[in-house]
Amino acid sequence: MAASELFNRYIWLVDLIFSSEGITREEINRRWSRSSLNYNNEYEIPERTFHRHKDAIKELFDIDIVCDRSAGKVYKIANSEDIKKGGVRTWLINTFAVNNLINESHHMKQRILFEQIPSGQRFLTPIIEAMRDNYTLTITYQSFHRERPSTFEVEPYCVKVFKQRWYLLARSTWDGNIRIYGLDRIHSIEQNESTFNLPKGFDAESYFNDVIGIIIGTNDKPEVIEIKVSNGQQNYFRSLPLHHTQYEAHTEMYSSTFTFFLRPTFDFIQELLRYGADVEVIQPLELRNQFAKIATDMNELYK
């Protein structure tokens, strides 16, 4: 069996058990018999094959499938709470589940639309392989702020997707600075023979903990930011918080006050600006004045 076929079967099994929150072997076999991945029209997943899949899933994704005999021999995900918190495993499972559903409903493909991510994602595989094995990369990169591309060596630390674009966080071997690179601006990538050591204690999630997006703003310090949201837009903030520190501090009939504790970087400012006059920055004063200047400049533009 091809590696890609096995991989798809693993994800299918994880998604089925995770979404059901407990399922018997009989039901797994019934669902498998109707799956679009069942190319050989098998009536069931043999017992030995099922347990081999379980072991491989544990090794590859650190997802433990266990049998709960007290509930009538149903299979569950032991660490399901970790998956619910998000991260690459959740992204992987959700992406596969949607793709599989679309494939099974091929007659509806034209009615299911997605946002496109630029072609820079083709570099994800060599980047992730270099991250896994701690190899440096030589990349040729075209910055939006330079006329010509440049070629240099970096140590790949992590990748992140933000607003339909993939980004690479990497340390330059030339000056030692950590920078962010958009994958859609990379012309070429070459894996080097030289290796590097990831800084002890480096955690990608913690690195971006105080910001929204991909701009760190090393000159900015996290601070309490208070905004007033009105005209029904507060419901969007409630259903999809901008940041994990978001807190609804005060609620009135037609508006709500939200607070954040983060660095007011460019990405955060852009997020607030897209709500127009429905969002008012209350504090800090410096940020409020910055928004006032933006509003003045826009007003002058449309006179």
Image (cartoon, rainbow, N blue to C red):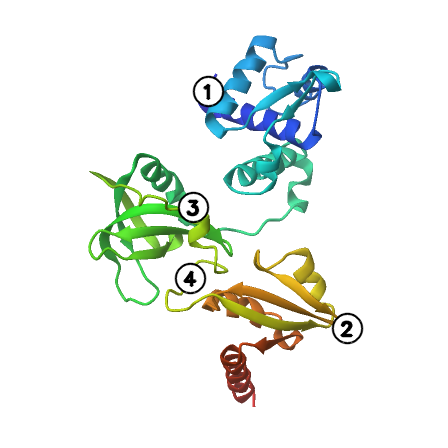
Label 1 – label 4 distance at C-alpha: 40 Å
Decide if residue 204 is on the left or right side of residue 289.
left
Percent x, y for residue 111?
A: 68, 46
* Local SS, label 3: helix
* Local SS, label 1: loop
Q: Which residue sits at x=48%, y=16%?
A: 1
Percent x, y for residue 85?
A: 58, 42
Pointer 1 and pointer 3: residues touching (CB < 8 Å)?
no
Percent x, y for residue 116?
A: 53, 51
Decide if residue 242 is on the left or right side of residue 217.
right
- Is the residue marked by circle 2 packed among few (<14), some (14-19), or many (20+) residues within 10 Å? few
- In primary-sequence order, the first of circles 1 and 2 is 1
Identify residue for label 4.
215
Identify residue for label 3.
121
Q: Is residue 233 visible?
A: no
Q: Is residue 185 above or below residue 72?
A: below
Percent x, y for residue 265?
A: 46, 67
Amino acid of disc 3: Gln
Q: Is residue 76 above or below residue 171?
A: above
Amino acid of disc 1: Ala
Identify residue for label 1.
2
Q: Nearer the viewer, mark 2 or mark 3?
A: 2
